[in-house]
Image (spheres, rainbow, N blue to C red):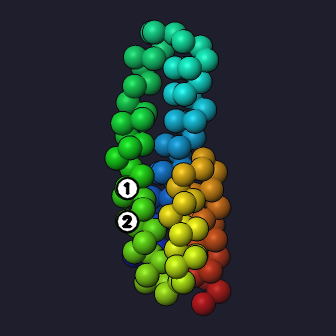
Amino acid sequence: MSGVLKRFRFMAIFAGVMSLLLWFVELPIVYILNNENWESNVKWIPIVHGYVYPFYVFTAIHYSVRARYDIKKMIFFILAGTLPVASFIAERRALRESRQS
């Protein structure tokens, strides 16, 4: 289980960082500041985020199946990747639950 947990933790942190960059760097620059020079520097953020999130979903499903969680908890782990800080919370919860068992 430790390999599955390590992969999930890595992807949760990576997806969380990319989500934070998307919500608080790329989107404000594009829609609030409307600066062409800065926009060209942050075009990579939504692309990387778009590739990272599906891998996060796969690792969340894999971890949930291996941990034998019910469907409701699995959906929580999957949806945690959609909010900027929720994936960090899910990662901490998975680590805490793995230490208890």
Residue 54 horizontal/vertical position (percent): 37, 55
Q: Quadrant of the N terminus?
A: bottom left
Hey, which quadrant is residue 91 in on the image?
bottom right
The residue sitting at 54% across, 28% down in the picture is 27
Which residue is more in the foreground, 95 or 40?
40
- Tell me the kind of residue under disc 2: Phe
Mark 2 is surrounded, within 10 Å at the Cα level, by few (under 14), some (14 to 19) or many (20 or more) other residues, namely: some
Residue hosting label 2? 58
Question: Which numbered tag is attached to residue 54?
Answer: 1
Asked whether the viewer can see residue 72, the reply is yes
For the residues bearing labels 2 and 1, Cβ distance under 8 angstroms? yes
Left or right, 46 with respect to 90, comes to: left
Residue 19 horizontal/vertical position (percent): 53, 43
Q: Quadrant of the C terminus?
A: bottom right
Element marked by disc 2: helix
Asked whether the viewer can see residue 6, the reply is no
Left or right, 19 with respect to 46, comes to: right
Hey, which quadrant is residue 46 in on the image?
top left
Which residue is more in the foreground, 48 or 74?
74
The residue sitting at 52% across, 10% down in the picture is 35
The residue sitting at 46% across, 68% down in the picture is 60
Against 91, residue 71 (above or below) is: below
